Image (cartoon, grey):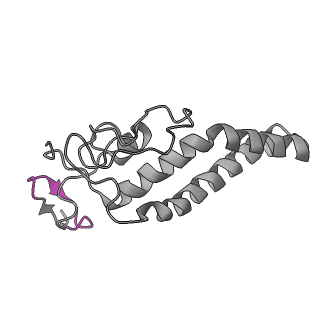
Amino acid sequence: MGDKSTTLTGLVRGKFAPITPYTPYPMKLIGKGSKPYSILTAKCPRCHEGEMFVDSNPYNLRNMDKMHASCGVCGQEYEPEPNFYYGAMYVSYGYTVALFVAVYVIFGVWLDWAMWPTVGALAATLVGLGPWLFRIARVTYLNIFVAYDPEAKG
């Protein structure tokens, strides 16, 4: 029933899942091997083991933006070209807009707060989650360009 094709790993995929050299492994949605795992844990997008940031605490403001040059496990470069992370500003903007919409719906619509308390809640949320948003935007942007490879171990 329907077209079936086989990936490089021998797994059967549907007819709307083309085989390309860039997607040799089916993407998982949860756990190691998935994009959300790499993004939420700030792990290397290629091996999902190496740390991307020098300090794992985004609220240590002295080291918030300090990244390793490459993965200590698989050697993936974390800055593939100069000024690579300028594109992460667009990802950060998307995350911030989604966060603001969610906070506004919760406080302004659902809890029926007045305008200025809602603006205060928005500001407090942005200040509180700012360092985390900075990091998650960078990790997400790198994950867009680097695919998971379970065989990428040193």
Specify whether 62 is left or right of 152: right
Residue 29: quarter of image:
top left
Residue 16: quarter of image:
bottom left
Residue 44: quarter of image:
top left
Image location of residue 53, percent across then percent down: 40, 40
Image location of residue 141, percent across then percent down: 43, 57
Image location of residue 45, percent across then percent down: 31, 48
- Where's the C terminus, which quadrant? top left
Specify whether 128 is left or right of 136: right
Above/below status of 133 relative to 143: above
Closest to the observer: 140 or 53?
53
What is the span of residues highlighted in magenta in the rendered image? Answer: 8-18
Specify whether 64 is left or right of 119: left
Closest to the observer: 69 or 94?
69
Specify whether 80 is left or right of 58: left
Q: Residue at x 27, y 43 (%)?
A: 33
Residue 1: in magenta span: no
Image location of residue 144, percent across then percent down: 37, 59
Closest to the observer: 116 or 31?
116
